[in-house]
Each structure stands twice: as C-alpha cells, then as structure tokens.
Image (cartoon, grey):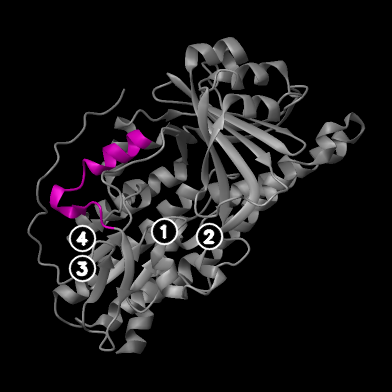
C-alpha cells in the first residue's frame, strides 16, 4: 500500500550551517541530493530551468541496494518511492524473489535468469516519484524558470560562486553541484565548450517508451509475463517490460540499433508513432507484436546518448561538482543509471556532512575544504560510474547479437550470459558501507595534509 504523502513545508528550517549549496537541475537525483543536504542542516537551493517539475510518464526501477542507499541519505526518500506506487518488478505468488529474465524475442524460449532476491527491484513511474520527492522540499528551496548559462568563480576562491541565468538574474552560493542531466551546462563550465567531454554523444541506439494498462498487457503476454520483468533479445533490438504504478500498468521500453547519425543532437526526443514500433518488431514473437500494438498511437522516440566516446577526466573543478547523468550519462541497458546516481548522492552527502561539521565548529571555514570534498568525491566515484557507461554499451551489444537470429548459433550466443551475470552482480552487490568508510577516511587524511 502506498504511504501517505508528507505535508510540504513553505520554508527551510533555521540552520547553523555556514554553507550555501546551489543545485542545478531538479530531476530525481537533484531532488534526492537536496533532501539529503536538508537532513544534515545545509542551506540548499535547487535551480530548475522548467516552469515546474516534469518527468516522462515512463517507468524507472531501483535495485534493493540503491533503495538501502536512499534510506541512508534520508528515510523519507524511501517513503516517497513507496508513496509513488513502487512495487517489486516480479509478482509471482509462488516465488517471492525478483529475477532478471532473458527470453528469445523470436521463439520466446527462456534463456537465462539471475535471482535478485526478495524485492530485488522496485519499479514506479518517474513522474510520480519526482512529485513525491518534491513534496519533501520546502517551497523556498526551489527556483523554477532558472536556466543556467554560466558560472563565475572568482580568483579569490573564498568568494561565493556566481550563477548566471538566461533571464539575466544571478544567484550566489558557496558551492555548486550540477545535477542537470545529460545536457549538463555545469559540465560545459567545468570542461569548456570546445571539449568533446562536455557533451554526450549518440550511442546509435534509440528507444520507444510507453505504458500499457495491465489488463491489456495480460491479454497480450499472459498473466505471468505481464506481471514479471522480462527482457526479450534479438538481432539488432531488444524489448524490456515490467509492472509499475501499483501493478496497474506495464512499462515498455523497445530498443533498436540505428546505423545512422541522429538528425538533431539538440533534440534527443523525437515524435514517433506506434506503427514505427510495430515495423521494428514485425518479425518478433506474436505476443510481443500484440504488446507493442497496445502502445499509444503517438509516442516518443528517445535517442540514447552517453559519455562513452569522451568520458570526463574529472567530475569537479574548484567549487563545482557533477553528480548523476551530468557526470556519467549512461545508456539504460543495465537499468542502473539512476542507481549510480543514488550512490553518488550518498557519497556526496557524507562528504558535505564532514565539511559542514568542520565549518560549523569554526576550525576550517575555508573554500579549500569544500574543494577537497569534491576532489574526494571525484576519486571515489569516477572509475565505477564510467565502468557502468562502458558495461552498458557492452551488454547492449550482447542483447543484439546476430546469432540470436540463427538457430544453429544459439548455443554460441548463450555463452554471453556468464559475462552478463558477472557485470550485473558488480552493480547489485556494491558495498556502499565500505564506500562510505573509505570516503570518510580519504577525506580526513587529505584534510590533515591540507592543514
């Protein structure tokens, strides 16, 4: 059952914190970070370019590991997830465990599965989760219609950072965290407009995304498949579906390999029709053809961009830091991009809590301490998150093997699942407690060297 939504506050509580943090971007990761910083008493403000919070009405899933990280950031985030209608992505009355399941998209032959344990994943609608998170943030903690165009850091690093917005207004803060997604302006400020690392690049795969009412999905797929996560693989394409919205809807993501360049890099979402999806999957199993026929007549086609071609050399510069997709945008083939963002937030909240305790007691109210925290974050998070970018590309290649279309080569193709399993477990079994201990130790040791 969904938890009741908390009453939203109008203003932030009084705090003794000596720090002001500006967060650029009001997506799911940006709002999680805001909630986490508010919990530890930091003054924080979110600058969001849209008129209001907005997200696509598609599904998103989090691993149980990521949900435990949310709980450490602030238990209210988990409550927000549950109040948004999250449910396990498997609903088998005879088996409480969640699984990743792979199926041949042509023959519907069961290929492989990995046990994720009880409530191993929880799926919900993105827009509903974002709305629930927003309820946790006081009204005065958010500024809408604030499209960032530049950030100015003074030569004197003790001076506040200045944010400049498209309408000519400005704001200042002690530090800025870019949570502004795949088109991050903060990333451009850090790496420069001329650097290819400032931009995500087309992965030559696009996705059709949509929701199908559960009762209709059951008719197309059968009750077991409709109520449980399944990944259907085939040459040059794959299709994922799982239940969301308290088991009333099925989220469908249909991925297609694209040999062409994307026509407009400034517009990564293009209008599409149901007929396009049907054409892409015309030779697939009848149940999948039936499923895609239930998608809305008009939907969106998403170009999948990532940072694989030109990864960022660093996630920080002075008093600026990147988190989530702004730092390491990944294709979604592991279903773990948002989970990595949650890990980022947990790590950064721990570091800012360390900084905040020092500044509050007056021992080192110096910008160098903030910079040191961001440098520690970069050290702790960059390698793992960029590995995900690489690995997500790799598993997509495995899902799209041409051998899936040749019965004589099925055995050769099936070998890939040992590799997929190893990669998947690296995501699921991440030791976030060890990360927190190492993060704290590294920061404190660096602080000693600084002093």
Q: What element carries label 4?
A: strand
Q: Distance between the residues labelled 2 and 4?
A: 25 Å
Residue annotated with mark 4: 44
Question: Tag 3 or tag 2, which sits nearer the N-term?
Answer: 3
Q: Residue at x 25, y 51 (%)?
A: 35
Spatial CA distance of label 4 from label 3 is 16 Å
Does 131 lie within the magenta span?
yes
- In the image, which is nearer the foreground, mark 1 or mark 3? 3
Decide: is 442 above or below 134: below
Mark 2: few, some, or many residues within 10 Å (few <14, many ≥20)?
many
In this picture, which residue range is highlighted in magenta?
Answer: 127-146
Is tag 4's residue or tag 3's residue first in the polypeptide sequence? Answer: 4
How many neighbours does mark 3 have within 10 angstroms: few (below 14), some (14-19), or many (20 or more)? some
Nearer the camera: disc 4 or disc 3: 3
Does residue 438 show up?
A: no
Dots 2, 1 in contact, CB < 8 A: yes
Which residue lies at the image location 44% right of the left edge and 62% below the top edge? Answer: 435
Q: Name the residue under label 3.
A: 170
The quarter of the picture where residue 40 lies is bottom left
Identify the residue position indicated by label 2 in the image: 385
Label located before the other in sequence (2 or 1): 1
Q: Can residue 339 be seen in this view?
A: yes
Q: Do the residues labelled 2 and 3 touch (CB within 8 Å)?
A: no
């Amino acid at each position: 059952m969904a938890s009741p939504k908390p009453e939203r506050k109008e203003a932030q509580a009084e705090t003794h914190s000596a720090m002001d943090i500006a967060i650029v971007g009001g997506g799911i990761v940006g709002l999680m970070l805001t909630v986490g910083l508010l919990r530890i008493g930091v003054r924080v403000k979110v600058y969001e370019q849209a008129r209001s919070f907005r997200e696509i009405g598609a599904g998103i899933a989090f691993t149980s590991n990521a949900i435990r990280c949310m709980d450490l950031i602030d238990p209210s985030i988990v409550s927000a997830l549950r109040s948004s209608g999250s449910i396990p992505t498997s609903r088998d009355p005879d088996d409480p465990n969640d699984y990743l399941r792979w199926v041949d998209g042509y023959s519907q032959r069961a290929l492989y599965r990995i046990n994720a344990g009880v409530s191993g994943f929880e799926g919900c609608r993105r827009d509903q989760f974002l709305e629930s998170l927003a309820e946790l943030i006081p009204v005065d903690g958010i500024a809408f219609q604030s499209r960032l165009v530049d950030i100015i850091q003074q030569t004197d690093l003790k001076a506040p950072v200045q944010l400049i917005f498209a309408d000519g207004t400005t704001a200042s803060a002690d530090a800025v965290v870019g949570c502004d997604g795949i088109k991050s302006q903060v990333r451009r400020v850090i790496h420069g407009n001329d650097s290819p690392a400032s931009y995500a690049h087309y992965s030559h795969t696009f996705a059709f995304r949509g929701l199908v009412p559960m009762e209709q999905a059951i008719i197309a797929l059968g009750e077991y498949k409709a109520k449980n996560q399944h990944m259907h693989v085939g040459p040059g394409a794959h299709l994922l579906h799982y239940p969301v919205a308290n088991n009333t809807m099925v989220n469908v993501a249909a991925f297609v390999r694209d040999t062409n360049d994307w026509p407009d890099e400034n517009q990564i979402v293009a209008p599409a029709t149901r007929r396009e999806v049907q054409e892409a999957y015309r030779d697939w199993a009848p149940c999948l053809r039936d499923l895609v026929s239930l998608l809305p007549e008009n939907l969106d086609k998403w170009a999948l961009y990532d940072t694989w071609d030109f990864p960022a050399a660093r996630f920080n510069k002075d008093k600026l830091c990147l988190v989530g997709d702004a730092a390491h945008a990944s294709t979604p083939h592991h279903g773990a991009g948002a989970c990595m963002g949650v890990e980022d937030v947990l790590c950064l909240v721990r570091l800012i809590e360390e900084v905040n305790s020092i500044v509050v007691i007056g021992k080192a109210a110096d910008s160098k301490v903030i910079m040191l925290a961001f440098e520690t974050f970069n050290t702790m998070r960059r390698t793992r998150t960029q590995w995900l970018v690489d690995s997500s590309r790799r598993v997509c290649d495995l899902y799209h093997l041409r051998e899936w279309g040749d019965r004589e080569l099925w055995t050769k193709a099936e070998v890939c699942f040992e590799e997929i399993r190893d990669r998947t477990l690296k995501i699921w079994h991440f030791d976030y407690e060890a990360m927190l201990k190492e993060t704290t130790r590294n920061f404190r040791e660096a602080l000693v060297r600084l002093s």
